[in-house]
Amino acid sequence: MDYVQAVGLLEKYGVKVISGSIARDKREAKKAAAKMGFPVVLKVVSKEISHKSDKGCVRVGITSEKTLEHAFDEIIHNAGSAKVDGVLVQKMARKGVELIVGGKRDAQFGPLVIFGLGGVFVEVLRDVSIRICPITEQDADEMIREIKTYPLLTGVRGTLPSDVTAIRKLLMQVSKLMVKEEKVKELDLNPVIVHEKGYDVVDVRIVE
Amino acid sequence: MEMNLESIFNPKSVAIIGASREPNKVGHAIVKNFIDSGFAGKIYPINPNAREIIGLKCYPSVSAVKGKIDCAIFAVPAKFVPSALRECGENGVKGAVIISGGFSEVGNVEGEKQIEEIARKYGIAVIGPNCLGVLNPSSRVDSVFLPVYKMGRPHVGGVSFMSQSGAVGGCILDLAARAGLGVSKFVSYGNASVIDETMLLEYLGNDEKTKIIVCYVEGVKRGREFLEAAKKVTVKKPVIMIKAGISVGGAAAAKSHTAALAGSSEAYKALFKQAKIIEAETLMELFYFSKIFDQPLPKGKRIGIMTNGGGYGVLAADAAEQTGLKLAELSSDTKKKLVEKLPNYVTVRNPLDLVGDADSKRYELALDALLEDENVDVIIVITLFQTVGLDSNVVNAIIKASDERKKPIIIVATGGEYTDVHCRILDSYGVPTYHSPNAAMKALKHAAGYAEYLERKEKRK
């Protein structure tokens, strides 16, 4: 499923992905950035690249048209021979804790929902909790508290506590999507950046 | 079909298809076990080539039996099973235990499908194929073909076992018999082609004689249904499970982070959490965890420790901290009482070191005081039997203290044969004993967690 379809499907279940638009060329990218306002993020959109940041296909914190032009060329170059569908221009997410929320289908138990500390090291840290869908609010709450890094969400070293209520709701929405949308085999929302009020879903991947 | 499970666990009459005169045959051992166990119902050996087996009249077929047959036990080669099962169906037999192997486990999927179809058509509850079958110490049903001199039979009690594997099931029964653990029902269900683990869990969940359910599982057939069934059962009684077989396949092919992180083992962990199933990692833990439920559930996590060895008190306190339990702050009343009654060289605090010359009287005093103390939810009694002062009388003191089931009392005793003898007596009175503080605390943690879960459920009502 491509990025636009994935965003559309998530919206159907009340999950809003951070606003962005797909540009086919530099001119469109600049127009989009001007409309949403700097700073922005650029990402290569390609079904053939699954770990975009590993390949240098993501640039964050772009503050001017000039840096945008450079970044555009650079990430297209880094995509190499992969088929590129466009470049995603996204509003820069607010600062917060990076989480992963996802879903998959298990041969014996059907849809599962997953929650954990996200970002690029997610598969190294494996600090995640998993439940069989559909989940209850109590399940969602336990999932959040279960990870080792839960204290990061309660506010440490002067940071404000994260919006756990919003994450709880997000987990329930993903569970509902996994139960209803049988075509979805795997789903990654990574990272989801949570702050004291709400969260930003920064990247989406849905495997059919 | 599920409702016919009763005819398997509590039959009034059984037919043994493939009964044999040869002492080394499975069909012989089953007839003998039914006779030796004192089964009060009718036993019909079925074998067209024999007139009598161990003094019982033998019948050429199920149809030749005039009386009603509740349960048929199959010990014939796989190829004879479908026709004999159909004959059972036509004669109104509602339960079948198919010990015979040679079905899907060796690729004979067709044969197993036939069993399913026949079972469905006639509404027969079928256990197996490829299993050890059923044991019920109270109705004296014993289809387990392992000879009594090789595998002990447990006495009547409240623990029910369901095991996918026959070999593991046999070990569990043998260990249970030796440990003096009372068993309500045992079932080795093999290929689970008709009656699967979800149906068995529901049956044992509704069975009033079953107080605790212990499962050995390699995989469940209907995961979602199993979860729903387990959720309903665990609010009534604890379920302890060991899941064998960690599957790594699949994760490698994952395209997303989620799929790479959530393999099949993780899905089982989710099952355990959502249904509040207590997970055991070893066979021994199945026993450690099940016997803790002989005691009342703890009302909290504050433990009081008494010992006749200071070092062991420290080890127990460490183990308690590591498992999230708390050392109780003894009440001033308790302290006063203990200072008055104990020798002046005993320092009154928790852990309470009764000192190396402690005798059963000293334990009795301490037990009385901690039972009265409202700050103490659980009492851990460490008895190191190697000392001169401690003798068998302490067992009486402990059993007496535990008699009212006021709060959980758990024993830690490490040692050799002398220690083991006393542990067995305590265990048989429902006072669980552990060889190490860690094993005791781990079991206690599960009991406390289960108690909290029930309380939460109760509150939400």
Image (cartoon, rainbow, N blue to C red):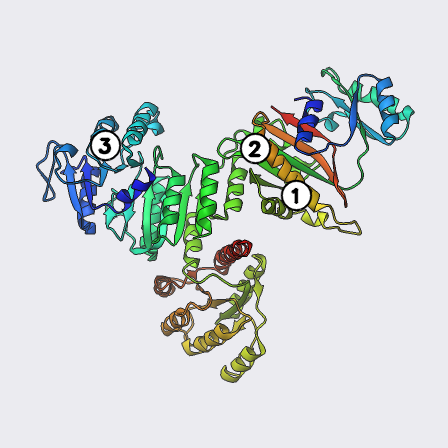
Residue B20 at what x, y percent from top left?
15, 37
Residue at (56%, 77%) from the top-left corner? B348
Q: Residues within 10 Å of mark 2 (few under 14, many from 20)?
A: some
Cα distance between the residues tagged 1 and 2: 17 Å
If you read the primary sequence from the N terminus, does the residue marked by circle 1 or circle 2 appear first? 1
Relative vertical location of residue A47 with respect to residue A100 in this rendering, above or below: above
Residue at (57%, 66%) from the top-left corner? B327
Cα distance between the residues tagged 1 and 3: 52 Å
Q: Quadrant of residue A173?
A: top right
Q: Which residue is mark 1?
A: A168
Residue B457 at what x, y percent from top left?
52, 53
Q: Residues within 10 Å of mark 1 (few under 14, many from 20)?
A: some
Let me know if residue B221 appears in the view.
yes
Residue B453 at what x, y percent from top left?
52, 54
Q: Which residue is mark 3?
A: B89
Q: Quadrant of the N terminus of chain B?
A: top left
Relative vertical location of residue B106 with respect to residue B297 in this rendering, above or below: above
Cα distance between the residues tagged 2 and 3: 40 Å
Secondary structure of the residue carrying numbered label 2: helix
Query: Residue flagged by tag 3: what amino acid is it?
Result: Gly
Q: State which chain disc 1 sits on.
A: A
Query: Residue flagged by tag 2: what amino acid is it?
Result: Val
Q: Which residue is mark 2?
A: A179
Mark 1 and mark 3 on one chain: no
Mark 1 and mark 2 on one chain: yes
Secondary structure of the residue carrying numbered label 1: helix
Secondary structure of the residue carrying numbered label 3: helix
Please name whichever residue, B148 or B213, is drawn nearer the observer in this view of the structure: B213
